[in-house]
Image (cartoon, rainbow, N blue to C red):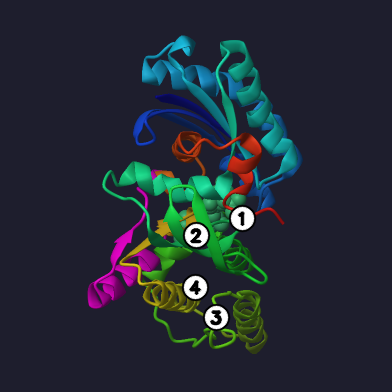
Amino acid sequence: MNVLAFESSCDETSVAIVRDGREVLSNVIASQISTHVKFGGVVPEIASRMHVEQINAVMRQAFNDADLKPQDIDLVVGTMGPGLVGALLIGLSAAKATALALNKPFLGVNHIYGHVAANYISHAELKPPFTGLIVSGGHTYLIDVDDFVHFELVGQTRDDAAGEVFDKVARKMGIGYPGGPIIDKLAYEGEDNLHFPRVMLEEDSYDFSFSGLKTAVINTLHSAEQRGDTLKHEDVARSFQDAVTDVLVEKAFRLARERGRDTIVLSGGVAANSHLRRALEERGDEASIRIFYPDLKLCTDNAAMIASAGYYLYQSGQSTAKAYATPNLGLK
Ligand code: ATP
Ligand code: MG
Ligand code: FE
């Protein structure tokens, strides 16, 4: 089954064609990062307008790369949320119009569900059940995944998302946007010598809180500035990143142990973080738990992951309303 997918929830315009949920025939991504970088974050109005400008060309390219014709498509899916509403509407309208024109079924897909499904593309052998750790620009979730369409939300952030805090700390440090990849790189040259807090919350809680850590980093930067000290950016990056990583790793392994899962699956933009990947793998070796994360290109927003999620939802006989709501994530 050939699935055509549209993703436009934030600042990537993406169209993909994926066969049977796992085989990527094309995955075209037009990123707007270079435009938003001068504002230090995504500007919703600009994002929507750029999606309008890009969407047709991106779709054409997706068909060209896959060497397929519109008639070869069996199912059309599109990200329905969460995301910026003006941005979402562009991809969603294009998806619905295409489904109508081709007389093919349409399914709306939850973006977070897509981030998890990126792993099905990168790892042909991966299937549920597993413990899921989703760390993206706007969300941080710990989930228990029973099968391809059922997630149990066990923990989430009570304030900032993991990716958001990377971006905010980087902005405060004045090192650029998006912060994640820059901090990832700087941290290699730094030491964890600033001892930022590891906020674990209540003993049995699977929730996260990163705003205290963010404030601690900002205060440390301010007091150094007032003392006329210069902190090494590398050390700030490393100390901050280690604090985030320790909490994520600890809670993911605790959940896997509690539920008797032998697999932890990482996803979302922060899954690109090389230190987080390594920390999970090291702990996984000790605990005999397998660790999966997507190929780098599939960590951040792309339509191939939406196609994969849409495929499994369709196979399970879900309607759009159910497909979107099933994961019960990001519906705040
Ligand atoms: P959401 O998926 O929650 O709606 P989003 O789509 O904006 O949010 P993603 O595309 O999942 O977010 O990821 C973008 C985020 O990933 C940014 O916050 C970025 O800083 C972060 N990120 C990207 N690469 C890395 C990295 N190497 N280390 C840490 N964070 C990273
Ligand atoms: Mg993005
Ligand atoms: Fe995303």
Front residue of 140/1: it is 1
* Amino acid type at image mark 3: Thr
Name the residue rendered at 40%, 14% in the picture: 68
Residue 115 visible from this viewpoint? yes
User: What label sits on residue 134 in the rendered view?
Assistant: 2
Front residue of 100/54: it is 100
User: What label sits on residue 329 in the rendered view?
Assistant: 1
Q: Label 4: how many residues lie within 10 Å, few (<14), some (14-19) or many (20+)?
A: some
Query: Which one is earlier in the sequence, the residue at label 2 or at label 4?
Result: 2
Name the residue rendered at 44%, 74% in the picture: 255
Query: Which one is earlier in the sequence, the residue at label 2 or at label 3?
Result: 2
Select label 1 or label 2 by which is in front. Answer: 1
Q: Residue 300, percent across and down?
A: 49, 47
Q: Residue 43, percent across and down?
A: 72, 45
Kindly indicate whether the residue at mark 3 contacts the one at mark 2 (C-beta within 8 angstroms). Answer: no
Kindly indicate whether the residue at mark 4 contacts the one at mark 2 (C-beta within 8 angstroms). Answer: no
Q: Residue 301, percent across and down?
A: 52, 43
Q: Circle 3 sits on which residue?
A: 230
Q: Label 3: how many residues lie within 10 Å, few (<14), some (14-19) or many (20+)?
A: few
Front residue of 101/35: it is 101
Query: Which one is earlier in the sequence, the residue at label 3 or at label 1?
Result: 3
Q: Magenta residues: mostly which secondary structure? A: helix
Please provide the residue range marked out in magenta. Answer: 273-297
* Amino acid type at image mark 1: Leu
Q: Circle 4 sits on which residue?
A: 233
- In the figure, residue 8 lies in which quadrant? top right
Q: Label 1: how many residues lie within 10 Å, few (<14), some (14-19) or many (20+)?
A: many
Left or right for 5, reference 87: left
